Amino acid sequence: MAEALNPSLTRRDAARLLGAAAAVAAVPSRWTARRADVDALLRQLTLEEKVSLLHGGTDPASKGQAGYVPGVPRLGIPEIRLADGPAGVRVTASATALPAPVALASTFAPDLARRFGAVIGREGRALGMDVLLSPMTNIVRVPQAGRNFETLGEDPLLAAALVAGEIRGIQGEGLIATVKHYAANNFENARQTIDVKVDERTLREIYLPAFEAAVQAGVGAVMAAYNHVNGVYAAEHPHLLTGILREEWHFGGWVMSDWYATHSGKPALTAGMDMEMPFGVNYGGLAAAVSSGRLAESAVDTAVRRVLVQLDRFGLLGGGRPRPAPDPAGGARAAKEIALAGAVLLRNERDLLPLGRADLADLVVIGPTAASPLVGGGGSARVIPASAESPLAALRRQAGPGGRIRWATGVDLEGVPVPASALALQRTQQGAQQGAQQGGAPQAAAQVDHTGADALPAGSSWTWTGTLTAPETGDYDLRIQGAGGVPSFNGSISLTLDGVRIGSVGALIGGNSSLIATSGGLTNAGATVRLEAGVAKPVTVAATGVAGTPLQVRLAWVTPRRRQEALREAAALAKGARAALVFAFNEGTEGADRAALALPNGQDPVIGAVAAANARTAVVLNTGDPVLMPWVGDVSSILQMWYPGQEGADATATLLLGGASPGGKLPVTFPRRAEDVPTAQPERYPGVGGVADYSEGVLVGYRHYDAHGVEPLFPFGHGLSYTRFQYGDLSVRAAGGGLSVSFTVANTGERAGVEVPQVYLGSPPGPPVPMPPRALAGFARVRLSPGERRRVTVAVPPRALQYWSDGRWTLARGRRTVHVGSSSRDLRLRQEVTVR
Ligand code: BGC
């Protein structure tokens, strides 16, 4: 342990910090706004034209993106297209599917965030987009929140560093970034209405820093969230949208609402919400409000000016800028590098990983996501890549001819077509649809199984009605599987049992179809239902196809017997093999939080059975956030790959086989038990009476576990390597209002590897306000060859020494401990400093 240095921090240092924080970051000079042009333009616009720039509309030539704002061609104001999202460009065309942002967060690497952003920036421009609806930087507060995979973890300092890098990457390619969802939008349950009750200090210290960093990085747009914050909709919140964003942070861009999150005209506009998306339900009336004297035209002008200034800054006015060619190869390279860098080795007993040649000669792989890759999470962040290999195929490819790799699903998500013996059905074709043949009279149908060569005609529309009778009592997974359905809000291929909709394929956000396709490439949806032997249940399957694509429909089930069989097959295959790999998953998606922290679909017993059958079992996780692991002590190794994007399979195989060492760190705490999480009380989550009380205050994520002495399953910042690192020679000095923390990291193992040393700052004794015992204050990412040692210096920003009180940042004075370590719970070096 190093000797104390006692650097003193003065008030002057702190004042310097505050000045710096208030400055708006420089933007690339070629996009510097030419305000005079914008004001001249504004004077030439009619009131109706101005208002048309303040809300979305229907794109006459849609590319499948989320939003569109018509331009004013006579004045050279272009139409603008706005596309999601956080893991790649979401349009009809295929695009690079990057790893989920949680994987990016695990890299702790702002330079990789910049690269991530640059891929999306270039591709967005190439695909005809002008604005990106990303990055998302809401703090992970609830471990089972549906969109945790889309955002940048539970720590504000980490999220701030990464979001700033990503924005520079996106906007450096000329695409306008939109940081979202401002603010305190941390879970999906009742997301459009929930009222978040949060105190100002918690907002400032936990939920706002990443947004402030985005503004400092020059972000062009901000998306206002769905939820209320302290009783006021975020999209009409003067304190958030004007007080903080404009007056304190000097944000020069425009604010748009989340989709259908605008609830008023004048109140929202005058609060600082410039653009209603996706349509002008409220803002369409602004012109009338001005004409009738209810709204000052200057309020409209202010909002329009903010939009035009950004269009001008990005060179989009008066003819626009040339668009680059897509660079799929460059996107794929970045996707792989980030998937590799974001992988977190959670456990590696007896160094089972990386697998050796002998393991590959007799390896058993279990799990549906080994065969059908889980590329990304669901909802508006879902990106469809041109192709994605499966981990099984990548393992076989990388193992080469000497490999013998056998697979079993273990968990059967697909099942078999419900047999004729369990069905009594009639099939009816509905009237002509998009050129398909005429409807007809009902006919008897044995099963619903129209796939491949037996697909139904494109554009046709059908219903099957009758009864379903189970042969034995038990829990059945009923599945509706399909492809070629017409896009629709509720899904166009659906299954209803006993009047209850069990599943639908092709629904927009909020549907229950799985992200994991069937082996034949069908979308798979459904639910587990208890059926009694011999009891006939009314059943309906309905399917409406889209023109040009054959309509495939299958009604399938996984019987209780089949579930047991799949588990036994997996265990039997694993028994006697040299090593077993189980791929486990959860399915994070917008619109719904996970029902439980446990792995879904009965995966725990399968992992348990495989681990019991083979002592050399490793688990590969494709989850977007924390899961419980009742089997943690029974398996040798756990590799967290998150949702690793289109190159995820290649990256996974490379890491498992030792072509690279994992070097990612957890950006979220993994709890041991559901009751241990900071939001375990219903008042906090999902809320009571429509209010979610953020009463845990600043004790979010690891801060909660440390403050309450709760042992996590895997702590924030945790991540092992195939090599070992040693820390030493800590020195700390005051610098620029913050601290400069230097230490040495050495690779003492036999392989090259990456370490992410983390600096945590302790609270002073008897803190002026409740503070967590330690908070992340800085980090670095170093790649070291075997035997190599490096002096690392981490700058701790002044803000890390402060807390929010009485409307300003205040130094937390007194003796504080600087810790340096390999995770928030693996602290290797410490030194006391006195902050004065
Ligand atoms: C999501 C946003 C997204 C928008 C457009 C909303 O439902 O909350 O994150 O950008 O849809 O797709």
Image (spheres, helix red, strand yellow):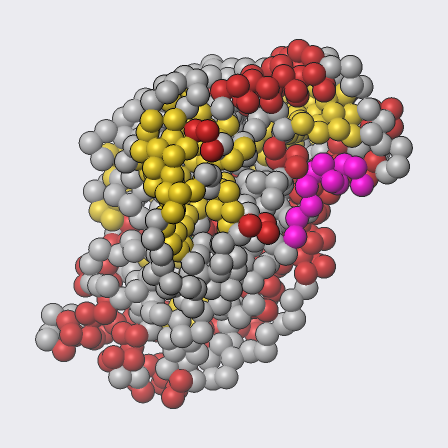
Quadrant where the N terminus sits is: top right
- In this picture, residue 314 sits left or right of residue 203: right
Q: Let me know if residue 670 appears in the view.
A: yes
Residue nearest the viewer, comparing 739 with 570: 570
Q: Residue at the location (56% across, 18% down)?
A: 564
Q: Residue at x 80, y 41 (%)?
A: 397
- In magenta, the rendered stretch is 387-397
Q: Does 325 sit left or right of 691 as displayed?
A: right
Q: Give the residue drawn at x 51%, y 72%.
A: 314
Q: Is residue 557 magenta?
A: no
Q: Position of residue 164 (x, y in %)?
A: 53, 52
User: Quarter-wise, where is residue 658 in the image?
Assistant: top right
The residue nearer to you, when weighing 215 against 68, is 68
Q: Quadrant of residue 368?
A: top right
Q: Is residue 314 above or below residue 359?
A: below
Percent position (x, y) of residue 811?
43, 36
Which residue is painted at 20% across and 70% down in the image? Answer: 286
